[in-house]
Image (cartoon, rainbow, N blue to C red):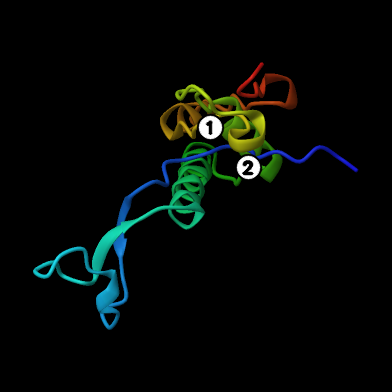
Amino acid sequence: MGLYRNGVGAPGKLVMSTLAPEDPLQAYYEDTETWYGRISGTSMSCPVTAGAATLLVDAYYQNHGEYPDPIDVLNTVETEAEDVHDGYTVESMGAGFVDAYDAVRRAESDDWGTFGTVKLVDD
């Protein structure tokens, strides 16, 4: 059995999102529009991570005319992740929080992360 760990994390706490307008229990106050509210969880953080990976893929394609290998995308997103919060562990955060800006810069210059450049939060 292999080691399981998260790859990266992203903001997912109290993210403003759309809500079901027919569910009045999701409103915070009487005058609050019921179709917007703050939600927490992986359903909020996953789109941030997916968006960062998409930006990286597009940056590489725009600069090199081809799509990158998936492993290069994964390694680069993990290599550029930031350890920005105390108390997170490899089990809960993996390599750290997604840094889309630095990952995109690496893709633009064809400077991919590798297994050897991925640093886990506790390293």
Q: In which quarter of the view is residue 37 placed?
A: bottom left
Asked if 30 appears above or below 2 in the picture, the reply is below
Residue occupied by mark 2: 68
**How many residues crowd mark 1 within 10 Å: few (<14), some (14–19), many (20+)?**
many
User: What residue appears at the point 66 percent right and 24 percent down from the top-left corner?
Assistant: 118
Residues at marks 2 and 1, CA–CA distance in whole angstroms? 9 Å
Where in the figure is residue 33, as x and y percent of width and height?
15, 70
User: What residue appears at the point 45 percent right and 44 percent down from the top-left corner?
Assistant: 55
Residue occupied by mark 1: 107
Give, as a three-letter code, the residue at label 2.
Pro
Mark 2 element type: loop
Mark 1 element type: helix
| Mark positioned earlier in the residue sequence (2 or 1) | 2
Checking the image for residue 79, the label placed there is none
For the residues labelled 2 and 1, say whether their Cβ atoms are less than 8 Å apart.
Answer: yes
Asked if 13 appears above or below 97 in the picture, the reply is below
**How many residues crowd mark 2 within 10 Å: few (<14), some (14–19), many (20+)?**
some
Asked if 112 appears above or below 41 in the picture, the reply is above
Give, as a three-letter code, the residue at label 1.
Ala
